[in-house]
Image (spheres, rainbow, N blue to C red):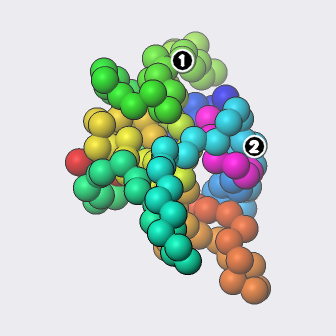
Amino acid sequence: MLYIEQLAAFVVNQTPHPINLVLGDDTITIQPQGEPIRLPESRLDDGVIATVKLLPAQLPEPAWLPVPSNSNCDGQEPFLPVSEPGHPVTDASGWFEYAPVLFIVPMVVAQFAAQLGRGDFIAPDTGSGAVRDSNGNIIGVRGFVRYCV
């Protein structure tokens, strides 16, 4: 778990790869932690094209961070980690507050979690927030996306 001051939150990267968060001239590499979270699926082999049936979810509109919240949702699907309470954060003055724990996951998982009322799942902003190399490959992101219902 890594605290990122610009987000005022702790983050846990549950994607299968490191994420480079580009903040001005600085880059923070967030290493994967634990098993990547993926949506459950069932495969229906219909010949040459296999149909993948994902859990039903209407896709919500994105909302841009930082807007941390730490809501909890009972009855969540078992593949999602349980919401974590905030962890204390102190500054030089000795004041402290509780910073939320946000899970970095693939976009489709963040969208699904939003349908369950979970505001603690974020996805890398690989759209307009993507940082690309000279070949057009994504090498980092400038922020994250939170989906809301």
Residue 56 in percent (x, y) is at 30, 51
Q: Quadrant location of residue 35?
A: top right
Tag 2 or tag 1, which sits nearer the N-term? Answer: 2
Q: Nearer the viewer, residue 29 or 74?
A: 74
Residue 43 in percent (x, y) is at 50, 56
Residue 22 in percent (x, y) is at 66, 59
Find the distance from the CA under tag 1 to the CA under tag 2: 20 Å
Foreground disc of the pair 1, 2:
2
Type of amino acid under label 1: His
Indicate whether residue 144 is drawn in magenta. no
Identify the element where label 1 is drawn: strand
| Chain part drawn in magenta | 12-18
Crowding at mark 1 (Cα within 10 Å: few <14, some 14-19, many 20+):
some
Q: Quadrant location of residue 117?
A: top left
Q: Quadrant of the N terminus?
A: top right
Residue corresponding to mark 1: 87
As drawn, 103 above or below 51: above
As drawn, 105 above or below 141: above
Identify the element where label 2 is drawn: loop
Residue 69 in percent (x, y) is at 37, 32
CB atoms at circles 1 and 2 under 8 Å apart?
no
Q: Nearer the viewer, residue 24 or 19?
A: 19
The outermost residue toward the bottom is 135
Q: Quadrant location of residue 36?
A: top right
